[in-house]
Image (cartoon, rainbow, N blue to C red):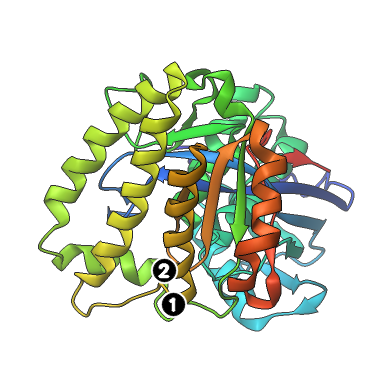
Amino acid sequence: MFENSRLLIDSSNPPEPGQVIWRSPSNLAIIKYWGKYGRQLPRNPSLSLTLASSCTDTSLEYAFKEEPDNQIDLDFFFHGEENDAFRAKTLAFLESLTPHFPFLRQLQLTIQTGNSFPHSTGIASSASSMSSLALCLCSLEDALFGTLQDGADFDRKASYIARLGSGSACRSIFPHAAVWGATPAVPGSSDEFAVPAAGLLHPAFKDFHDDILIVSTEEKAVSSRAGHALMEGNPYAEPRYAQAKARLSSLVQALQEGDLETFGKIAEDEALALHALMMCSNPSYLLMQPNTIELLHKIRAYRAETKHPVYFSLDAGPNIHLLYPGELVSDIRGWIEEDLKEHCVDGWFIHDWVGEGPEEL
């Protein structure tokens, strides 16, 4: 899909050097994707909310090579500094994309990227970083060849390319919410790319907040890639996939109806199921930390006491996503300051909310 061997630059009419820049957000899966097959294809469909302030800025500078060769020439900078590990990973990814962007071998590339939040700590930095890179590549293709003028075609290819780098990244392409994985609950959904799901949201969910409580900034002991691989031997894998499919249908109905209670129950159940799967893997592993557990107890106690619809979610890490409607901002942020931030590393938390999706800068 999206392969095009004819996308080659005419050496007799080379382009001027240029630059494209995209800012792309992370996303929070409410129905979790955990387990894959083939090349980054999901064992179950997932549904995510697109965030706003947790994002990656990626700049892609390009110039036509005067001396052609068969290599991709790449300089890579992360937060302004050369990063050999990230460069090697990105270079391998770009090499894998040459069937889709064969012109990459004709260019000298410089990528500069940086996050507004800590990477590799369970806030889906791969989603924001790979989606911003995919958007840059699609903008580069369109600038050189004019092949992605249609907005829907552009988004679909960007989502597909992002997925090849990181499965969850394909959902970050769209505003408010996205669904990835074929499901009868969402017509047009696909395993190959995500589809926009803003149309499924009751207005209450378009003003939803996600304040991220930073329990730890240390890199995870087990990467998400390794965690997905461990699902192949997990005895609960098949029941889990069936569970996720059923929950997605229930979640879609709750989102359409503005049913906060059902939404919150599904969000919390999914977060705990994700971590239970990790604990049932072989070898097993545990990403929650003592302050994670303490915060979960406090969130449930606060909800029982105040009757406020405030819920938690977790990605593949120890940090907590605190979910609540916008009308509660003043109450919840006061509570975070008074009672929750003492459990965060250096009192750090990130104010975030459902956002408008990526932005070309």
Q: Name above or below for residue 72 compared with residue 27.
A: below
Q: Is residue 15 visible?
A: yes
Asked whether, in this view, residue 19 is left or right of residue 154, the answer is right
- Mark 1 falls on what kind of element? helix
Residue 31 or residue 11, whichever sits in front: 31
Residue 130 or residue 281, whichever sits in front: 281
Percent position of residue 89, x then y? 55, 72
Q: Residues within 10 Å of mark 1 (few under 14, many from 20)?
A: few
The image quadrant that residue 66 belongs to is: bottom right
Quadrant for the N terminus, please: top left
Q: In the image, what residue occupies the spot 44% across and 18% down?
A: 256
Q: Are marks 1 and 2 in contact (CB under 8 Å)?
A: yes
Percent position of residue 7, x then y? 62, 41
Q: Name above or below for residue 121 compared with residue 203.
A: below
Looking at the picture, which amino acid does disc 2 mark? Ile
Residue 174 or residue 254, whichever sits in front: 254
Residue situated furthest left in the rendering: 235
Q: In the image, what residue occupies the spot 72% across and 30% down?
A: 146
For label 2, the residue is 293
Asked whether, in this view, residue 242 is left or right of residue 144, the answer is left
Looking at the picture, which amino acid does disc 1 mark? Pro
Percent position of residue 317, x then y? 46, 67
Mark 1 to mark 2 CA distance (whole Å) = 5 Å
Q: Is residue 6 visible?
A: no
Residue situated furthest right in the rendering: 16
Q: In the image, what residue occupies the spot 16% across and 56% down?
A: 237
For label 1, the residue is 290
Residue 61 or residue 108, whichever sits in front: 61
Asked whether, in this view, residue 123 is left or right of residue 38, the answer is right
